Amino acid sequence: MSDGIDTHTKNSKMVAKLSRPETSGLLFALVAPTIYGAGIPLSKVFLDYAGPWLLTGLLQFGAGLGMSVLYFARPRRTDIALQGKDWPRFAISLVMGGVFASVLMMVGLRGTTAATASLLLNLEGVSTATIAWMLFRERFSRRLAIGLFVITAGGALLCLGGDGAQVRISWAALALVGACLSWGIAANVAQHISGRDPVQMVALRGLIAGGGNILLALLVGERCAHWQVIPLAAMAGLITDGVAVLCYIIAQSRIGTSRTATFFALAPLVGASVALLVLKETPTTTLLVAGGFMLFGLGICLGEKHVSA
């Protein structure tokens, strides 16, 4: 009997610990980059059959449709729904993250390998944390600064590497850096509404940005090589662009923008690993050295002790 009571007590303590905002926020912050990172090599495959603008729209629209079903299937939460004063910030985050960043990432991904592009996207965490510190005065420790500097050094190595580098200062590298900066702005603007209904925000983001990107892609002449790509990309988007962003917003509301962005630096490492293992891309010396820098920098950042603002 006592063993049963002890087990029940331990389970209750574990559930209580997982239900804490801090602990659950960390879990969401780990799930988001794992899902999103795995989707980067998958997007590389889809780019063989659809243009970057059209593919962006299909991924987003699939996420929007799936999250809309979830939004209407669950009990309504009017207390956390977007309010009138929230719409300007939501619109800015939607344009910067849902249009500029997403399209630029696909353009950059098309011009390089999935592994290299994945690692270069580590700069998103750097830009997000730096903007949070410079413009929004979020607490920024020396340890975090050192870690982000090391990550940035790895990104610079990918852009300025020697003969073995897969990305140089080119349109592909500039597109990926532009995507990271756009995501940094979007994440910081969205931080101020991260306490609102995340399902509603992801659904609206997917439907509006996705629908707009599809329309614009069709207007400039982009098409799918095979119609089967449309439902497959939409289903992939529900996971990689829907569930991942949902987890990111929840984590952001619980542990802050800088820490969430730091954990999201795992996404490029996951993407690079999947690209090397599944797509059989050949690693170069520059890629391995840059990956080592980024992994080391991420370890420094994740070892930071959180200090409340």
Image (cartoon, rainbow, N blue to C red):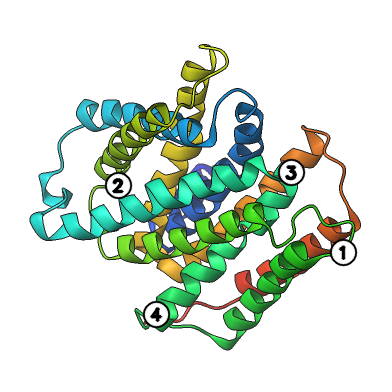
Q: Residue at x 72, y 73 (%)?
A: 153
Badge 2: how crowded within 10 Å, few (<14), some, or many (20+)?
Answer: many
Q: Which residue is mark 3?
A: 113
Q: Residue furthest bottom?
A: 142
Which quarter of the picture shows residue 300? bottom right
Q: Earlier in the sequence, mark 1 or mark 3?
A: 3
Q: Nearer the viewer, mark 1 or mark 3?
A: 1
Labelled pair 4, 2 in contact (Cβ < 8 Å): no
Q: Is residue 177 left or right of residue 222?
A: right
Q: Which residue is mark 2?
A: 198
Between the C-alphas of marks 2 and 1, the distance is: 43 Å
Labelled pair 4, 3 in contact (Cβ < 8 Å): no
Q: Earlier in the sequence, mark 3 or mark 2?
A: 3
Callout 3 secondary element? loop
Badge 1: how crowded within 10 Å, few (<14), some, or many (20+)?
Answer: few
Q: Nearer the viewer, mark 2 or mark 1?
A: 1
Q: Where residue 138 is drawn, which disc sits there? A: 4
The image quadrant where one finds the C terminus is bottom left
